[in-house]
Image (cartoon, helix red, strand yellow):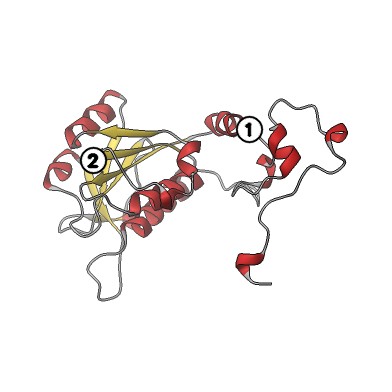
Amino acid sequence: MTEDEREVGVGPWPGGVAAWPDDPRLDPELLETGDRRNVLDRYRYWHLDAIVADLDTRRAPLHVAIENLEHDFNIGSIVRTANAFNVAGVHVVGRRRWNRRGAMVTDRYLTVHHHADPAGLAQWAGERGIVVVGIDNLPGSTPLETAPLPRDCVLVLGSEGPGLSEQMLAVCAQVRHITQYGSTRSMNAGAAGAIAMYAWAREHLPVPPAGG
């Protein structure tokens, strides 16, 4: 059996309707037809709203932003990773429309904010005491591993290729970079976002039990 042929999730609840649990979090349609979503086992058969409500009780005090200047395809990947770290929110700066395919519907499980420009993001963060931290390998930036990241912060990724804009750099309280050892000048924005979120989580989040 190939990886593509393996069934994901679970089938209908065993025993039929008469055996369904009496739990308002459970979705009758999923109980009847099965749950093939990419969710943790503890959320099998749960309504979407019930999953979101549970996630809301333990959101990380981390936000992630990306400049959407060229309809960046990495935004979907960053949203999916942000869901994995259960961040408080994702912020799209610039163009409102973004390609959701890479998010694999994970945008339904968190809040996606929009800001017209870097000044809008900076105002939003400033009103909440959230530090704006740019992630880009620029002269004068600090390696992620050499200094702690603020607990209440928004990690900002630039568009693929050009990186952070001058306008965004102007509102960043600090700029950090990911140490690289090869020949390429920069790495994929989605990969950089995942590394930055992982670095923040290692500092500020407890290690959960296996399986989430």
Q: How many other residues sit within 10 Å of disc 1, few (<14), some (14-19) or many (≥20)?
A: some
Q: Which image quarter holds the N terminus?
A: bottom right
Q: Residue at x 32, y 51 (%)?
A: 147
- Residues at discs 2 and 1 in contact (Cβ within 8 Å): no
Q: Is residue 118 left or right of residue 147?
A: left
Residue reaching furthest to the bottom: 183
- 117, 33: nearer the viewer: 33
Q: Can residue 197 be seen here?
A: no
Tally of numbered discs:
2
The image quadrant of residue 53 is top right
Image coords of residue 111 (percent x, y): 42, 33
Residue drawn at point x = 20 percent, y = 47 percent: 69
Q: CA distance from mark 2 to mark 1?
A: 31 Å
Find numbered disc 2 in the image and state the secondary structure of the residue it sits on.
loop
Q: Which residue is mark 1?
A: 47
Q: Secondary structure at mark 1?
A: loop
Residue 104: percent from left, percent from top: 48, 49
Mark 2 neighbour class, 10 Å CA radius: few under 14, some 14 to 19, many 20 or more: some
Amino acid marked by disc 1: His
Nearer the observer, 193 or 160: 160
Amino acid of disc 2: Arg
Circle nearer the N terminus (2, 1): 1
- Residue occupied by mark 2: 95
Q: Residue at x 65, y 50 (%)?
A: 211
Question: Where residue 195 appears, x then y in whole percent?
Answer: 39, 56
